[in-house]
Amino acid sequence: MEIAIIAHDGKKVEMVKFLEEFKDFFLQDHIKLIATGTTGNKVENAGFKVQRYLSGPIGGDAQIAGRVAEGKCKMVLFFRDPLEKHPHEPDVLMLLRICDVHNVPLASNPASAKLLIKGVSLVNTEIKPI
Ligand SMILES: O=C(CO)COP(=O)(O)O
């Protein structure tokens, strides 16, 4: 299962903490992580294998949207910073829209991401999620 990991600068520490909290899930063989450039760098430095795309502001969000549209990326964890302005806001909104167009689960904060990961884990052990 391909999962995209993206975090704005103010949320990158939180993203790495999140991955570490659920590392038993993220380190499974069938989980493939992809990420925007700088987020991917941080995630790699924390010991996770990840396929990195361009940095968000120069097209990384758009690349990940492409993978969602093509049916390759099955979940997006995108910790957005609602207190900062982003020059590439149109790309960010496009990614969110593409997730909705293709009914791909998207979590924009750690609480939601936790529920998604727990939900996938339950499905994988064949216990029905809520
Ligand atoms: O800007 C981003 C998402 O919109 C994230 O990009 P980086 O991971 O390259 O910082």
Image: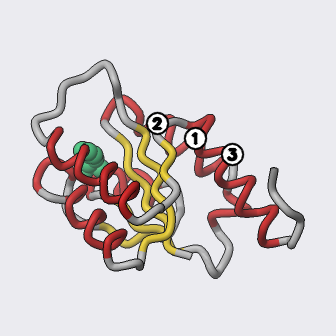
- Rendered image: mark on residue 13: 2
Q: Are marks 1 and 3 in contact (CB under 8 Å)?
A: no
> How many tags in the picture?
3
Packing grade of label 1 (10 A; few <14, some 14-19, many >=20) is: some
Amino acid carrying label 3: it is Leu
Q: What is the distance, in whole Å, between disc 1 and disc 2 at their CAs?
A: 6 Å
Kindly state the secondary structure of the residue where label 2 is placed: helix
Kindly state the secondary structure of the residue where label 1 is placed: helix
Q: Which residue is nearer to you in this view: 29 or 44?
A: 29
The mark nearer the N terminus, 1 or 3, is 1
Q: Note whether ligand 1 is within 8 Å of mark 1.
A: no
Amino acid carrying label 2: it is Val
Q: What is the distance, in whole Å, between disc 1 and disc 3 at their CAs?
A: 16 Å
Instruction: Reply above or below: 22 against 103.
Output: above
Packing grade of label 2 (10 A; few <14, some 14-19, many >=20) is: some
The mark nearer the N terminus, 2 or 3, is 2
Q: Are marks 1 and 2 in contact (CB under 8 Å)?
A: yes
Q: Is 104 left, or right, of 37 in this rendering?
A: right
Instruction: Reply above or below: 104 against 111.
Output: below
Residue occupying image coordinates x 25% and y 44%: 93
Q: Where residue 26 sits in the image (x, y, percent)?
A: 63, 64
- Rendered image: mark on residue 17: 1
Q: In what quadrant of the picture does the N terminus appear?
A: bottom right
Residue with the mark numbered 3:
115
